Image (cartoon, rainbow, N blue to C red):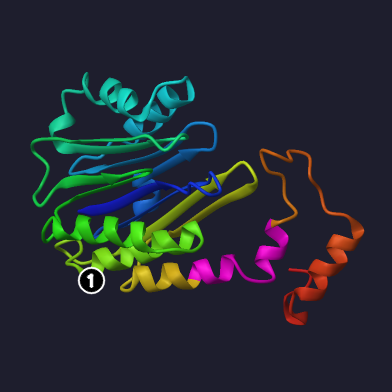
Amino acid sequence: MTFSILARDAETGRIGGAAATGSLCVGGWVLRGRVEAGLTASQGTAPSTLWGEAALDEMQAGSSAAQAVSRVTTPDPGRAHRQLAALDVLGGTAAFTGEASVPACASRSASGVIVSGNMLTSESVLDAVLSTFVSTTGALPDRLLAALTAGEKAGSDSRGLMSSAMLCLGPDMPPLNLRIDYSETPLGDLAGLLGRATARPYADWSYLVPTRQAPFRAPTDQDLARLNASVPTDMQGK
């Protein structure tokens, strides 16, 4: 049904996740994150958004990813139909795959990264996502997108893809929360949206808003003048 990746950039300390599925609205269903806690991906035949939030609560309170996943999944009688992955802020990872998950289903991990999936054409999808992320250099969002694209090329969700999403967080940046909720080409659309979100004028504006490290940041008159100058005339005032 879904394949997802959660990762920490060792150089910047930023964390990010991405997911794609053969159903609608993968971003709203699967990805959850908090700068002070980490990231989760909750998926499966009967995914629990409650799992994703509960695991974040656990990690924010000091639990490792492994502790969080165990504490959240163990008491749930419906866990056989669910899958959960977690990444804590130190890069620790863990995953759970219920025994009733639709094959191919599994998870893969390396230092600071975890990949999970179910209803895949084969587990080689997970191998492709993980190996591509590990071997790719550049900004975290670009590496995540490259990893998803490799998963699609390796076989993808057995139904094909219908939606995709990306969530990147860091104390020095506003959240990058991108969602393609329905498309015949969700990864291509996600790439296009990522390009727009990291280019002018949108990127100029994103540098002026508050972050965890600068919670009271606001634009100066000079910032606003520079921003307005970068906006096409037909977009000004909208």
Q: Tell me residue 25's x, y (percent).
A: 35, 55
Q: What's the residue at 46%, 40% (across, down)?
A: 33
**Could you tell me which secondary element the residue under label 1 belongs to?**
helix
Query: Closer to the camera, 184 or 98?
Result: 98
- 80 drawn magenta: no
Q: Tell me residue 112's x, y (percent).
A: 38, 43
Q: What's the residue at 74%, 79% (across, down)?
A: 232
Query: Closer to the camera, 190 or 12?
Result: 12
Q: Tell me residue 85's x, y (percent).
A: 30, 39
Q: Quadrant of residue 217?
A: top right
Provide the major secondary structure of the magenta segment.
helix
Q: What's the residue at 50%, 68% (across, down)?
A: 193
Tell me where the magenta segment starts and ends, as one range: 193-206
User: Is residue 192 positioned above or below 4 on the image?
Assistant: below
**Residue with the mark numbered 1:** 153
Query: Split into 4 quadrants, where in the image is the C terminus?
Result: bottom right
Q: Tell me residue 164's x, y (percent).
A: 36, 60
Q: What's the residue at 47%, 20% (across, down)?
A: 61
User: Is 153 displayed left or right of 204 in the figure?
Assistant: left
User: Is residue 127 positioned above or below 94 on the image?
Assistant: below
- 197 drawn magenta: yes
Query: Closer to the camera, 68 or 196?
Result: 68
